[in-house]
């Protein structure tokens, strides 16, 4: 029995050794050798593709950065808005300067009233326009206060000279403007909704526009037309009643806002056109004043 089991064990060991010594078929070697390079090639290909994608991404990012870098001062709303705000502060400073160093006889009632309406509307416009111009908003709030002080000085001067009828006329005009403005603000939403709901083609489209007649984007520039109009209607104003500080600020404002109006959102072509007109009229008055005070006197 033991002999039988011993022979069987011996046969199994010999069979195992002979199997281990058998050569591996060639087709198995070919499959294995082909699989390894293919896997390596796939890995290399993926790495190469990934590197190319990274380069392309980096190149695209670089292009965007270059585009951003190319956006200089000429296309910067912040730059032109800042200059416009500085010029606006010059206008506010002119009113403060005149209050301290100039007599009330040079104050123009029409220009002061227009300035009050203009700065009230532009304070709101500067707050809601994109990008928001906080410096310009603060400038116009300050100008409202300064122009109110100028109006007070003018009224006191007129009353002291016995011109009570003229003072009464100023106050009546001011009250009328305030009432019309309040009605317009309260009823504008209802009127706009009614016109848009009519589906009246171009009329409804204009009413619904971002810078349309029911928005401050429209009325702020229109108030500036009043300034330009006042300057155009008074082209022959005596030079002794022209404030150099005020008209210097107005001239600079017209120049800066002509560009700024085309860079804000929404783009405001009405604001651009009125500032071109303001630049022309204000520079005319400023030139007359400089000529009379510094050239003709020599």
Image (cartoon, rainbow, N blue to C red):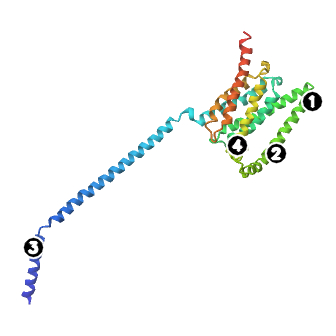
Disc with the residue nearer the chain's start (2 vs 3): 3
Identified at 66% across, 31% down, the residue is 86
Q: Nearer the viewer, mark 1 or mark 4?
A: 4
Specify the quadrant that holds the C terminus.
top right
Element carrying mark 1: helix
- Checking the image for residue 227, the label placed there is none
Crowd tier of the residue under label 1, counting other residues whose Cα lies within 10 Å: few below 14, some 14–19, many 20 or above: few
The first of marks 4 and 3 along the sequence is 3
The quarter of the picture where residue 232 lies is top right
Q: Looking at the image, is 93 positioned above or below residue 49? A: above
Residue 212, label in figure: 4
> Are discs 1 and 3 less than 8 Å apart at CB?
no
| Horizontal side, residue 120 vs residue 24: left or right | right
**N-term-proximal mark, 2 vs 4:** 2
Q: CA distance from mark 1 to mark 2?
A: 27 Å
Task: Please give the residue where the numbered disc 2 appears in the rendered image.
Answer: 183
Q: Which residue is mark 1?
A: 165
Quadrant that contains the N terminus: bottom left
Task: Report, in whole angstroms, how far the alpha carbon at label 2 lies from the one at label 3.
Answer: 110 Å
- Near-viewer residue (237 or 89): 237
Q: CA distance from mark 2 to mark 4?
A: 18 Å
């Amino acid at each position: 029995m033991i002999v039988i089991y011993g022979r069987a064990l011996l046969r199994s060991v010999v069979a195992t050794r002979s199997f281990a010594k058998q050569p591996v078929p060639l087709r198995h070697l070919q499959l294995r050798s082909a699989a390894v390079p293919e896997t390596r090639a796939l890995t290399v290909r993926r790495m190469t593709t990934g590197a190319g994608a990274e380069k392309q991404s980096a190149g695209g990012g670089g292009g965007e950065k270059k585009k951003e870098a190319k956006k200089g001062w000429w296309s910067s709303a912040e730059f032109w808005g800042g200059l416009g705000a500085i010029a606006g502060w010059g206008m506010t400073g002119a009113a403060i300067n005149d209050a301290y160093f100039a007599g009330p006889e040079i104050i123009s009632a029409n220009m002061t009233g227009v300035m009050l309406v203009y700065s009230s509307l532009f304070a709101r416009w500067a707050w809601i326009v994109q990008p928001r111009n906080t410096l310009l908003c603060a400038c116009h709030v300050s100008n409202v206060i300064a122009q109110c002080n100028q109006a007070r000085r003018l009224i006191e001067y007129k009353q002291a000279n016995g011109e009570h009828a003229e003072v009464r006329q100023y106050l009546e005009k001011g009250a009328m403007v305030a009432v019309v403005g309040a009605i317009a603000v309260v009823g504008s939403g209802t009127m706009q909704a009614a016109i848009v709901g009519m589906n009246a083609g171009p009329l409804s489209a204009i009413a619904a526009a971002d810078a349309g007649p029911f928005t401050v984007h429209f009325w702020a520039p229109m108030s500036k037309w009043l300034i330009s109009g006042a300057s155009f209607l008074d082209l022959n104003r005596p030079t002794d009643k022209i404030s150099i500080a005020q008209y210097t600020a107005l001239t600079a404002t017209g120049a800066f806002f002509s560009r700024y109006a085309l860079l804000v959102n929404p783009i405001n072509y009405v604001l651009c056109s009125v500032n071109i007109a303001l630049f022309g009229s204000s520079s005319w008055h400023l030139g007359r004043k400089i000529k009379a005070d510094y050239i003709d006197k020599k």
